Image (cartoon, rainbow, N blue to C red):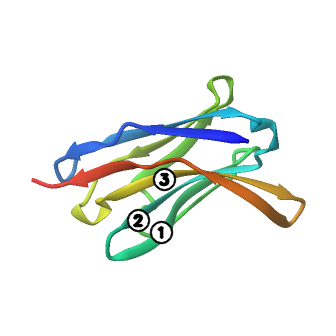
Amino acid sequence: QVQLAESGGGLVQPGGSLRLSCKASGSIFSINVMGWYRQTPRNPRELVATITNDEKTTYADSVKGRFSISRDNAKNTMYLQMNSLKPEDTAVYYCNAEHWAGDKYEYDYWGEGTQVTVSS
């Protein structure tokens, strides 16, 4: 089992910045990929960014150039630096941790989410 705890959400004005953190605990040796997803009441959960154990990253087109995903293995923590925030970035942001066996997805874990609100 892996436990994920997000923090860092809040209210920010358009153009502002926030940094989300996701601390992992438990059987983290089983995790190959970690990522951030977000969801609003009107939309399904969508991928924001992912990072692999060898630090390969992917981003949704909507956040490229504004968001940056990183990880600190010594602290078992993943981050999402969000800059130039827009009202449409408002969502609940979820931390995700996946286990893959080669090219086969096997299972994942989710955090409880942290609210990000971008509004003036």
Residue 60, image x, y percentages = 50, 67
Q: CA distance from mark 2 to mark 3?
A: 8 Å
Q: Which residue is mark 2?
A: 39
Mark closest to the chain's N terminus, 2 or 1: 2
Q: Secondary structure at mark 3?
A: strand
> In which quadrant of the rendered view does residue 40 lie?
bottom left
The kind of residue on which mark 3 rests is Tyr
Q: Which residue is mark 3?
A: 94
Q: CA distance from mark 3 to mark 1?
A: 9 Å
Q: Is residue 102 left or right of residue 91?
A: right
- What residue appears at the point 30 percent right and 50 percent down from the top-left corner? 116
Q: Secondary structure at mark 2?
A: strand
Is label 2 in contact with label 1 (beta carbons under 8 Å)? yes
**Within 10 angstroms of label 1, few (less than 14), some, or many (20 or more) residues?**
some
- What residue appears at the point 16 percent right and 48 percent down from the top-left corner? 13
> In which quadrant of the rendered view does residue 86 lie?
bottom left
Mark closest to the chain's N terminus, 2 or 3: 2
Evaluate whether residue 84 shows in this view: no
Badge count: 3
Residue 70, image x, y percentages = 57, 41
Is label 2 in contact with label 3 (beta carbons under 8 Å)? yes
Image mark for residue 45? 1
Q: Secondary structure at mark 1?
A: strand
- What residue appears at the point 85 percent right and 67 percent down from the top-left corner? 104
Is label 3 in contact with label 1 (beta carbons under 8 Å)? yes
Residue 119, image x, y percentages = 15, 55
The kind of residue on which mark 1 rests is Arg
Q: Is residue 14 left or right of residue 116?
A: left
